[in-house]
Amino acid sequence: MKVAILGMGTVGSGVMEVIRMNRQEIERQIGASFSISHVLVRDKYKERGVELRGVTITDAIDEIHAADIDVVVEVMGGMASTRDMLLEFLEKGVHVISANKDMLAEHIDELAEAANRNGAMLMYEASVAGGIPIINGISQGLNANRIQEVMGILNGTTNYILTKMTGEGWDYEKALDAAKEKGYAEADPTNDVAGFDAQRKIVLLSRLAYNRKVDIGKVRAQGIDSVELKDIEAGRSAGLTMKLIGRSTFHDDRLSIEVAPVFLPDDHQLSTVSNEKNAVYISGNAVGETMFYGPGAGGRETASAVVSDLISCLRRMECVERNIVPAHEAVITEDASPKRFYVRFTVDEISAGEQLSQHGIDYELIERGEAAVIITSAIKPEKLRALVENNDSIYVTYKVEGD
Amino acid sequence: MKVAILGMGTVGSGVMEVIRMNRQEIERQIGASFSISHVLVRDKYKERGVELRGVTITDAIDEIHAADIDVVVEVMGGMASTRDMLLEFLEKGVHVISANKDMLAEHIDELAEAANRNGAMLMYEASVAGGIPIINGISQGLNANRIQEVMGILNGTTNYILTKMTGEGWDYEKALDAAKEKGYAEADPTNDVAGFDAQRKIVLLSRLAYNRKVDIGKVRAQGIDSVELKDIEAGRSAGLTMKLIGRSTFHDDRLSIEVAPVFLPDDHQLSTVSNEKNAVYISGNAVGETMFYGPGAGGRETASAVVSDLISCLRRMECVERNIVPAHEAVITEDASPKRFYVRFTVDEISAGEQLSQHGIDYELIERGEAAVIITSAIKPEKLRALVENNDSIYVTYKVEGD
């Protein structure tokens, strides 16, 4: 099976890298081998810092048409001309995987129709929320539900800016500059900060969730470019966190949909989604509330979604629907990585401290008194065991995970 | 296509209910109709409070074998005898969907082998984390990754108990009693509180994530039955929250896996998962960290996962791989449900208060002074608009979502 990649920027390079890292696992799942045979670029002499041996690099789309490709992966961006290019592949029955939310938010219905007419697949997991498998979640995992609400943090750039304004007390300009420095915001950040990027994503999610065409021209989008620090701080004093939220609801065959900065209660799951992360809440009439959380951008992270589509696509071509039966028994060992441990002693902090320093364990004292409680610095489990063994003055220990 | 359901308890009833609620959407996705033709129960005369018209209710498995069933949905529980029953169906090429984690954690490999020998599907989304589509997430959405870590709150009963101990200061016995009263804990709560239930689930997830057989006999499980309130409180004072965590890591072909109460930093995403909810963290070498959150139990919630498997199974039988093209354009309207609003005035709290009471809007004052800030009680957007229109003394408003 032959695959062509259109575009070799951040996501395209990520796709090459993920395939290189995980080819064995990927081909096991497909039950066959495949090759990236062609890559379409604008400048074929440009150095790209990605391994492309054995791949034909071309700036001529005709060369790809001539090569009898099975699947085209579009990660180059662009609007009308990209749509035309993909339509041409679909009309020939070539499967298309696209990460191009801008184009898809406008043209997905005609592309999907062309795909159906020609027995092709059109897949677009990477177009929404980067590496989070939310398209798959809606179309497969939650497909027993009537979806009633979709609500998400769908843009990493603005979430980074709001996180810094909220957590560090930076004003909008300073936070935007930091986002540019981190590579999260582009030189012209309009698409992100004006809410257009989130608008495209909530359109794509809503179309799928409610099975309705959604005219993006009718979807209100308000960005964060006029959000002032003083409002974020006033909200905080009332237990509210500001987030740029794309949200839609569907009741009685009526869709409500918009993108806007809104306040969420601090204990809301979306309030704790920080920096460039994304998260999507889905509410369905059987499952109730679910949430999917993960990286909203990044080359390798987005490539996770692109390659997942590629695996599904190639599996379907091969009609692979075998159940997974692991060939090998797992070899189970202890997790020996250093961790912090919570330790409650039956003795006071002086005796406890003596024992700990005898074992060379640094710690933080949590409770003094007759039953001292401490938390160790990160140590190997064997070091804790040496302390605990045959030690009557330790009552209980717990691991601290997730540092 | 004909489906039989084995068992008609909480989950079985949930399956009937979800199919009744959403049949139109379900059949649209399958592209064909299907019937629940048989239900296997122990006592066929028992009143079940679920609509079973047109369904043959039987206590004789032979009747189901004789009926030329395509898919069997097993939601009855049981160990060896259930395994034998399902093997017999699989050997005949009948597809099997099971929610039975106890049995699967022991027997899934032989069942999957039997399925593969006979061209049958074995699906088990509902066996782990209730309605959260985590099996699908691992096997489809994240299948471009080598998974490196799985870490989750996999048992709703113990999470409810720990939430109450942490948040309300209840001791273990009081929290357990409350869990029983709520229906989260059984009369004999051993399976949950001793960690066996979470152990089965981390075994099933790890097998799938790392493609290794996992011998459950080798997996350490520590429950919460000896957790004392004073440790939870000491942890809290150090910014740590106790959770019962099933966790596994896979590095250099070595699996580390266990269930234990551990402390997590308060700002960890799993720390905010409360009451009977479940959540699973997955870390992969392409995507980095992702999390799936949702209901871990409940009839209708778990049925969401069972019916999702049923849809996938029937779609594959029908070879339905059409791309979704919505037939209708969405009718977009404003979300008119009452919400709270944040309002910053350019006037002080006295003038602001006068305006608000003129419009009959209750509110909470957040900031006094020359630019008062208030949060309204839940009001319809039109009521806010009436306040804001042609009003120079309002500087900005934001919606409060997620209450």
Image (cartoon, coloured by chain):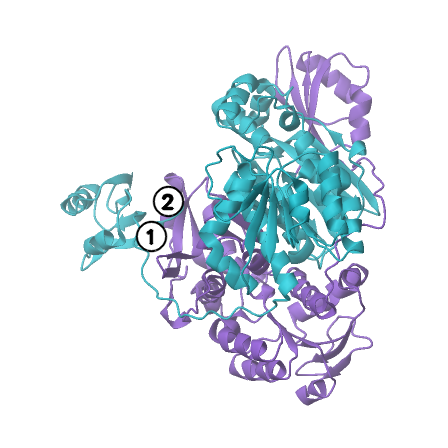
Chain colours: A purple, B cyan
Residue B126 vs residue A148, the one in the foreground: B126
Q: Residue A341: x percent and y percent?
A: 70, 28
Residue B295 vs residue A22, the one in the foreground: B295
Residue A196 vs residue B392, the one in the foreground: A196
2 and 1 marks in contact (CB < 8 Å) = yes
The answer to whether B176 is drawn above or below residue A282 in the figure is: above
- Mark 1: which secondary structure? strand
Amino acid on which the number 1 mark rests in the picture: Tyr
Q: Residue at x 67, y 49 (%)?
A: B66
Q: Residue at x 64, y 80 (%)?
A: A93
Tag of residue A149: none
The answer to whether A4 is drawn above or below residue A124 in the figure is: below
The answer to whether A397 is drawn above or below residue B136 in the figure is: above
| Chain of the residue where label 1 is placed in the rendered structure | B
**Residue assigned mark 2:** A235
Q: Residue B91: x percent and y percent?
A: 77, 50
> Callout 2: 10 Å neighbours few (<14), some, many (20+)?
many
- Mark 2: which secondary structure? helix
The answer, for residue A177, to whether it is visible in the render is no
> Could you tell whether B175 is left or right of A37 in the image?
left
> Callout 1: 10 Å neighbours few (<14), some, many (20+)?
some
> Could you tell whether A361 is left or right of A246 in the image?
right
Q: Are marks 2 and 1 on the same chain?
A: no
Q: Mark 2, mark 1: which one is toward the viewer?
A: 1
**Residue assigned mark 1:** B398
Amino acid on which the number 2 mark rests in the picture: Gly
